[in-house]
Amino acid sequence: MRKIRIYLLMVVLTLIAIGVVMIYSSTAIYAWERFKDGAYFLKRQLLFVFIGALACVSVMAVDYRKLGRYAKVLVLLSLFLLLLLHLPGVSREISGAKRWFRIMGFSFQPSEFASLAVIIYTAFFLSVKGTQRIEHFTFGFLPVIVVLGMVSLLILVQPDLGTVIALSMVVLIMLFSAGARLRHILYIGLLAAPALYLLVFSVPYRFKRITAFINPWADPLGSGFQLIQSQVALGSGGIFGKGLGKSMQKLFYLPAAHTDFIFSIIGEELGLLAALAIVVLFIIFFINGAKIVKRASDSFGAFLSLGIISLIGLKAIINIGVSTAIFPTKGLPLPFISYGGSSLVFDMIGVGLLLNVARFSRQKLEA
């Protein structure tokens, strides 16, 4: 397991390093225009990396098996934080969305904590119940869905449909791997389909995202603008790119160039080969994470690892898919690369848990 841990850690560090470089490249001019400090976002991202590294090391130092005792507490705390967002004057509102707390000049997004809390709870629940109980709808399947539903409802109110979709898919993957009946999963899917339809087609900005995804040129200066600029960035980079720092789309053409669409800037400046290298790194991450799942010393560690690699993998797939126009715009960051404190810190906590599971698995195998 030592080699797996080394490979996993090296991939994550490489992705973080790429992210730091590309965040500075994509924000230097914007940061100077707005804050008179070209390294404003770079310095904050380095601080987030430092905090994430401390959190990762701290998580690795504790036996992950003790987390199961606090699974319910973590879920309750996440529900409290999500409710707290809606108290007047507490949360930070951006573009009509209340997803962040503002603490000492930094933003904290409780949905990132809630996602990890739900994964920990689900992993512990599945490990305790066992395969036979999970097959039972009322006692093995429904409790996890209820917890997921409560958390998802509070995240939807923010609103944040992308996180809900990703988290729901992760939980269903965990349930299916634990032996849940496929028809139970299909029942939930059928029940959720009308709600998803209403959430997408009855909300104007989400409906515009779908129409822009189908034909961005129908409204090139409105709903299709971001997607078109993303395609321009990727297409103009060619195979080898324009060169680091030479992107044109980051010059106030492509919105969210350092967050949701940083993959497009990578493609423009470093080219197709670099973009493919990013994809390969995430594949290597997933393969080594899957090896940890397979070799975990207990079912809690296996389900926990599965949930973490599924969440990080889905976020990467969705983000890259949005940048390349495979999916409609969702607003999910690219793990380890996009600018953002909460997402980076909790992704690194997830990596710490993966390495923790691998460490204790190795000890058991060698004993």
Image: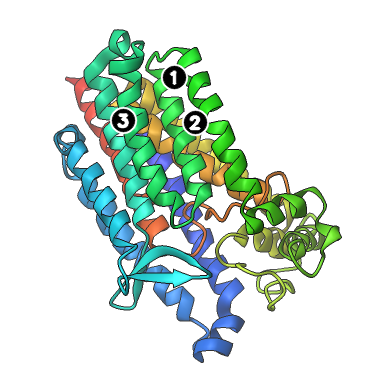
106 displayed left or right of 336: left
Tally the numbered discs.
3
31 displayed left or right of 212: left
x, y (%) of residue 341?
A: 39, 64
x, y (%) of residue 269?
A: 70, 65
Q: CA distance from mark 3 to mark 2?
A: 22 Å
Q: Nearer the viewer, mark 1 or mark 2?
A: 1
Report the residue marked by disc 3.
122
289 displayed left or right of 257: left
Report the residue marked by disc 1.
176
x, y (%) of residue 71?
A: 21, 37
Instruction: Find out whether the residues at labels 1 and 2 contact each other: C-beta distance under 8 Å.
Output: no
Report the residue marked by disc 2.
287
Disc 1 marks a residue whose amino acid type is: Phe
Disc 3 marks a residue whose amino acid type is: Thr
Give the mark nearest the N terminus, 1 or 3.
Answer: 3
Camera sees residue 192 = yes
Viewer-closest of 108 and 15: 108
Which quadrant of the figure contains the C terminus?
top left
Disc 2 marks a residue whose amino acid type is: Ile
Give the mark nearest the N terminus, 3 or 2.
Answer: 3
